[in-house]
Image (cartoon, grey):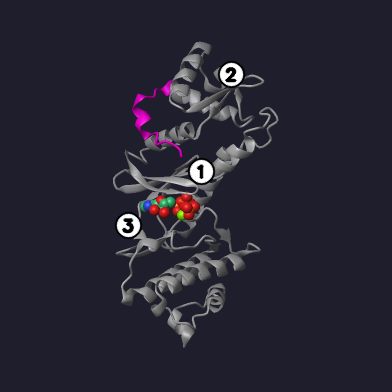
């Protein structure tokens, strides 16, 4: 679990951030950045580096190790602060709020500018990386990029995909991205898994969702992690979120992923609302219709 670092912003000084971004720069070359290299990476004097290292260590933003040499590495908390500060400096975020969700591979917080937004810090590769690398020789590092690189790539990817899909597909509007963080509009409503649909809404909501799947496919993407946990249902309809793993429709396995997405959705509705989902609804037929861009309504396929 990564701590919420927003409260540290007011007490940190510019030089603390020079140090943090100095460590970040050094980490392009090795996971543990040598102490001697920091003045150059950070643009600070020797004395200033020592003073800033202490302040950042004390706040858990960096970690120190003395194995073959004295080295420093960023903690996710330090990386979060670098991203958060960049987003604040460009006025994307003016207020920080409470957690909206802790996913397997992300932390999501409510933030604000002139309206409510959601800030998602990607955490891909974090846990795996820590376990795999615990016992490693830190100088032999080809994979040092790991968590920082993986998390940043996931955020860039999710932001790019949202930009391509919005507004044709009902996804959260993307606002900004920095490092491993993306900012998007805050969705209203609740997760489909927690929604209690009325009898006369069930088939309509399923159909809305399949239409979003079809529209995303037309634009060129298959979500590939479609489930009741990645869909919001609100007054104004449905929103499909959590896109970093989406695959282009040209991908070799796109057809397989599309079928799984359709099966996941329909399977969920069948389990939760058995009396409202027609038995003869054919997942494979729906997936094929989506591929052929002929999908219109569930009822049309049943006729
Ligand atoms: N734009 C948003 N507005 C409001 N809440 C959001 C928004 N984006 C995400 N959330 C909340 O945060 C949770 C985690 O988000 P998301 O599913 O994108 O992350 P994840 O870590 O990839 O999830 P998973 O557990 O599926 O891997 C969501 O279930 C949702 O409750
Ligand atoms: Mg999710």
Q: Which of 134 and 295 is in front in this view?
A: 134
Check disc 1 and report the residue beneath it.
123
Which range is magenta? 1-15
Which disc is residue 188 wearing? 3
Which quarter of the figure has residue 199?
bottom left
Is the distance from the Cβ of mark 2 to the nearest ligand 1 atom less than 8 Å?
Answer: no
- The vertical placement of 297 against 108, above or below, is below
Check disc 2 and report the residue beneath it.
35
Name the side, left or right, on which 174 lies relative to 155.
Answer: left
Label 2 neighbour load within 10 Å: few <14, some 14-19, many 20+: some
Is the distance from the Cβ of mark 1 to the nearest ligand 1 atom less than 8 Å?
Answer: yes
Badge 3 element: loop
**Is any atom of residue 211 visible in this view?**
no
Q: Nearer the viewer, residue 261 or 248?
A: 261
Decide: marks 3, 2 in contact (CB < 8 A)?
Answer: no
Q: Residue 131, position in %: x, y?
A: 60, 39
């Amino acid at each position: 679990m990564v701590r919420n670092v927003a409260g540290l912003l007011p007490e940190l000084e510019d030089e603390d951030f020079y140090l943090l971004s100095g460590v970040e720069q050094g980490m392009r070359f090795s996971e543990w950045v040598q102490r001697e290299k920091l003045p150059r990476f950070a643009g600070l004097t020797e004395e200033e580096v020592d003073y800033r290292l202490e302040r950042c260590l004390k706040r858990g933003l960096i970690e120190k190790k003395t194995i073959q040499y004295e080295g420093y590495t960023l903690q996710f908390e330090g990386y979060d602060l670098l991203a958060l500060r960049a987003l604040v400096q460009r006025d994307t975020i003016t207020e920080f709020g409470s957690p909206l969700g802790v996913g397997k591979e992300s932390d999501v917080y409510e933030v604000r500018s002139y309206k409510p937004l959601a800030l998602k810090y990607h955490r891909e590769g974090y846990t795996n990386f820590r376990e795999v690398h615990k016992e490693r020789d830190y100088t032999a590092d080809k994979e040092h990029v790991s968590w920082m690189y993986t998390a940043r790539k996931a955020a860039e990817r999710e932001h790019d995909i949202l930009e391509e899909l919005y507004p044709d597909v009902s996804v959260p509007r993307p606002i900004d991205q920095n490092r491993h963080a993306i900012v998007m509009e805050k969705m209203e409503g609740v997760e489909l898994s927690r929604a209690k649909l009325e009898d006369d809404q069930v088939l309509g909501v399923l159909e809305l969702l399949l239409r979003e799947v079809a529209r995303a496919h037309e634009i060129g993407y298959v979500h590939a992690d479609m489930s009741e946990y990645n869909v919001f249902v609100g007054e104004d309809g449905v929103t499909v979120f959590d896109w970093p793993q989406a695959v282009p429709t040209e991908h070799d396995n796109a057809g397989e992923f599309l079928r799984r997405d359709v099966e996941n959705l329909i399977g969920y509705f069948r389990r939760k609302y058995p009396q409202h989902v027609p038995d003869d609804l054919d997942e494979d037929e729906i997936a094929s219709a989506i591929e052929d861009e002929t999908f219109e309504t569930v009822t049309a396929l049943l006729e």
